[in-house]
């Protein structure tokens, strides 16, 4: 089996397999994973005027890599973009009414909570694969990065609709950012001081047929920001205005302060895992990943043909289908829970290309 084919092996979640070869290989990789709880990813990203369902989180992780590999070593230049939102069900219901310019329910007190964590960064990563025994490999990677996109903070409180149809409540907001999406504060370009991230993984071949593997990304990570913009605000009343077309506009009364301060930011840990059983030319797999305290587990297969691999997997909990296609140079992966991209709530896209230098 060639080294490149091993690098795209169906039996492991590790980014690559080791080799005794002294040849250099160049690779490119792009991957994105997104989920929106009970709402379409497209609607949340575009903030469309649609009926929103109550949910509790939404996230997007994406990265692009360009690297070289020799033997057990790999050096990678990368860019990544992550955003994570956690919120109460009342918050999504309240947001849906505000976004669609509708009145909120007069008989309901909305308990509001929103936590945001967003990062845009670029950096370099060095990784190594230790072949500790003929059947057990340990993978480690360390990355240094600089970030230039930040949103980090939370809002909490409560809100309701009074007898006069005006809104009452208390909401506190505290967040740090490089772009002010709420109050449009003019800002100079801001960049983090530095950041780092550590990954750890393993591959264990228990028998000729059975292989277990796992990978924890961002196992330990920090991004340090110096003198980044901060807003603290408080709102306790809001006037409502009904437009001639019947739409409702809300004008909250806000007070607070804007200043600058330091921040140590961290991103959520992401874990991947797989059990692969090979019978003939086919790998039968149980694979998945864990993020935001949710597990995305799939059952599927991948079949090897001369010059081509293909496979499929089903995510029962999300109702999503994944398709895989690869050869000795290229690997493609697509997962979604709906054929219409505007209705997808869970999706993953992967692309990898590797050639010898």
Image: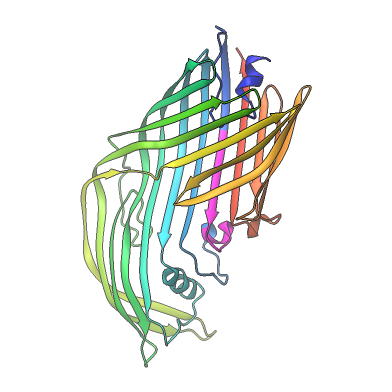
Residue in view at x 64 percent, y 58 percent: 342
Residue in view at x 41 percent, y 58 percent: 86
In the picture as drawn, the residue positioned furthest to the front comes out as: 207
Residue in view at x 47 percent, y 47 percent: 291
Residue 294 location, x and y as percent? Answer: 49, 52
Where are the magenta residues, as a range? Answer: 30-44
Choose between 120 and 53: the one closer to the eye: 53
- Judge left or right: residue 338 versus residue 87: right
**Is 13 contained in the magenta span?**
no
Quadrant containing the C terminus is top right
Residue 302 location, x and y as percent? Answer: 71, 34
Compared with 244, 122 (above or below) is above
- Judge left or right: residue 314 versus residue 219: right
**Is 43 contained in the magenta span?**
yes
Residue 284 location, x and y as percent? Answer: 69, 36
Choose between 49 and 162: the one closer to the eye: 162
Choose between 277 and 263: the one closer to the eye: 277
Compared with 32, 340 (above or below) is below
Residue in view at x 25 percent, y 65 percent: 233
Choose between 178 and 112: the one closer to the eye: 112
Q: How many marks?
A: 0
Residue 143 location, x and y as percent? Answer: 39, 28
Quadrant containing the N terminus is top right
Compared with 187, 237 (above or below) is below
């Amino acid at each position: 089996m060639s080294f490149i084919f091993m690098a795209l092996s169906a039996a492991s979640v590790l980014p690559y397999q080791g080799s005794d070869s002294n040849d250099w290989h160049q690779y490119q990789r792009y991957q994105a994973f997104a989920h929106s709880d009970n709402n379409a990813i497209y609607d949340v990203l575009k903030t469309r005027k649609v009926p929103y369902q109550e949910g509790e989180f939404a996230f997007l992780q994406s990265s692009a890599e360009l690297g070289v590999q020799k033997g057990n070593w790999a050096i990678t230049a990368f860019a990544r973009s992550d955003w994570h939102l956690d919120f109460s069900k009342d918050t999504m219901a309240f947001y849906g009414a505000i976004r669609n310019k509708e009145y909120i329910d007069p008989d309901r007190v909305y308990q509001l909570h929103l936590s945001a964590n967003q990062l845009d960064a670029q950096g370099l990563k060095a990784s190594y694969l230790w072949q500790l025994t003929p059947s057990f490999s340990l993978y480690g990677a360390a990355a240094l990065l600089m970030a230039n996109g930040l949103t980090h903070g939370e809002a909490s409180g409560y809100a309701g609709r009074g007898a006069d149809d005006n809104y009452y409540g208390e909401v506190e907001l505290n967040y740090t950012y490089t772009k002010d999406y709420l109050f449009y504060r003019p800002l100079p370009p801001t960049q983090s001081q530095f950041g780092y991230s550590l990954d750890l993984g393993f591959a264990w071949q228990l028998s000729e047929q059975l292989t277990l593997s796992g990978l924890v990304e961002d196992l330990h990570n920090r991004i340090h920001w110096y003198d980044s913009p901060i807003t603290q605000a408080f709102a306790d009343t809001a006037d409502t205005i009904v437009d001639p077309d019947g739409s409702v506009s809300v004008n909250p009364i806000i007070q607070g302060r804007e200043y600058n301060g330091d921040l140590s930011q961290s991103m959520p840990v992401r874990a991947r895992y797989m059990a692969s059983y090979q019978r003939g030319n086919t790998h039968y797999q149980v694979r998945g990943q864990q993020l935001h305290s949710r597990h995305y587990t799939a059952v599927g297969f991948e079949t090897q043909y001369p010059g081509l691999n293909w496979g499929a997997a089903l995510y029962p909990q999300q109702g999503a289908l994944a398709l895989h296609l690869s050869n000795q140079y290229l690997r493609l992966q697509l997962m979604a829970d709906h054929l219409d991209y505007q209705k997808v709530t869970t999706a993953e896209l992967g692309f990898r290309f590797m050639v010898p230098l």
